[in-house]
Image: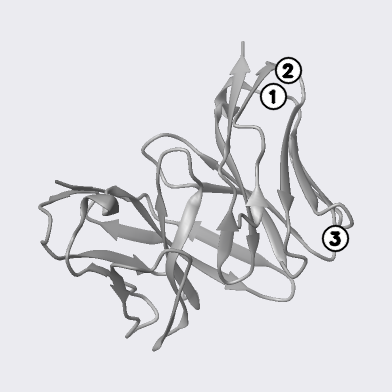
């Protein structure tokens, strides 16, 4: 049981390049989300999904696109990278029930835009 | 507008003593409250959660207290151990979470 898998772990991009951060979960969780963490700040929500085919914006969505074609995968796309997008990105999957709550993070992708 | 706040950026506690980390929130509609621990170069690790319908939840050395009238959440770690040294984040929400900015806990041997 791998949990939440993020690839790549590290990436350097040039300004204006595009790339996709991959996220996959094998826990059959309904909810998935992307966060970024910057020095001195908490994790900030970029985009989230409450199920396949459904996505919504979080706190800092500009410059990022997402899609959710399957329950397992939730890729994050940077269309034209900017230095302000240098950050550590975390993907998470979660479930909510009347009796319980589970939220699992991946190990992160460290992105540098030069 | 920061909905979840951790006003202490750092805390140092002697090994064996109690560590108390605090968190304040503004949105009374939050369903769940959680604490995460994070080591450098790793993803956040879930510690303990509490539903908005409860006021206390225990798991081993970790206890979370929720005071809804004060919109205040706290995490107690007893006894504190050197391996507890990390950054602790509180979070609130349901299918999406809002995080505080974190408190760096240092346990002094």
Whether residue A58 can be seen here? yes
- Up-down: is B107 above or below A91? above
**Residue B98 picture quarter:** bottom right
Q: Which residue is mark 2?
A: B16
Have a look at marks 1 and 3 and say if they share a chain. Answer: yes
Tell me the distance, in whole angstroms, between the alpha carbons under discs 2 and 1.
5 Å
Secondary structure type for disc 3: loop
- Up-down: is A51 above or below B67? below
Secondary structure type for disc 1: loop
B71 left or right of A33 in image = right
Label 3 Cα neighbours within 10 Å, binned few <14 / some 14-19 / many ≥20: few
Q: Nearer the viewer, residue B12 or A81?
A: A81
Where is residue A114? Give x, y as percent: 14, 46
Tell me the distance, in whole angstroms, between the alpha carbons under discs 1 and 3.
25 Å
Where is residue B97? Give x, y as percent: 57, 62
| Discs 2, 1 touching: Cβ within 8 Å | yes
Tell me the distance, in whole angstroms, between the alpha carbons under discs 3 and 2.
28 Å
**Residue A2 picture quarter:** bottom left
Q: Nearer the viewer, residue B72 or B108?
A: B72
Label 2 Cα neighbours within 10 Å, binned few <14 / some 14-19 / many ≥20: some
- Quarter of the N terminus of chain A within the rendering: bottom left
- Up-down: is B74 above or below A19? above
Q: Which mark is residue B54?
A: 3
Identity of the residue drawn at 28% across and 54% down: A85
Where is residue A46? Give x, y as percent: 41, 65
């Amino acid at each position: 049981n791998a949990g939440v898998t993020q690839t790549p772990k590290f990436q350097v991009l040039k300004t204006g390049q595009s790339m996709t951060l991959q996220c996959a979960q094998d826990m059959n969780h309904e909810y998935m989300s992307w966060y970024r963490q910057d020095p001195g700040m908490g994790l900030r929500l970029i985009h989230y999904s409450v199920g396949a085919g459904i996505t919504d914006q979080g706190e800092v969505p500009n410059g990022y696109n997402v899609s959710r074609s399957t329950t397992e995968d939730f890729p994050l796309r940077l269309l034209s990278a900017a230095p302000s997008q240098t950050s550590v990105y975390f993907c998470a999957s979660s479930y909510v029930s009347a009796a319980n709550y589970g939220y699992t993070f991946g190990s992160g992708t460290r992105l540098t835009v030069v | 507008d920061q909905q979840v706040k951790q006003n202490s950026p750092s805390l140092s506690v002697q090994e064996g003593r109690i560590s108390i980390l605090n968190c304040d929130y503004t949105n009374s509609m939050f369903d769940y409250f959680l604490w995460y621990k994070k080591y450098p170069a790793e993803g956040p690790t879930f510690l303990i959660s509490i539903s908005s319908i409860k006021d206390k939840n225990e798991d081993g050395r970790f206890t979370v207290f929720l005071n809804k009238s004060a919109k205040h959440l706290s995490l107690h770690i007893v006894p504190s151990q050197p391996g507890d040294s990390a950054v602790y984040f509180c979070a609130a929400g349901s299918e999406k979470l809002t995080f505080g900015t974190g408190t760096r806990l240092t346990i002094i041997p």
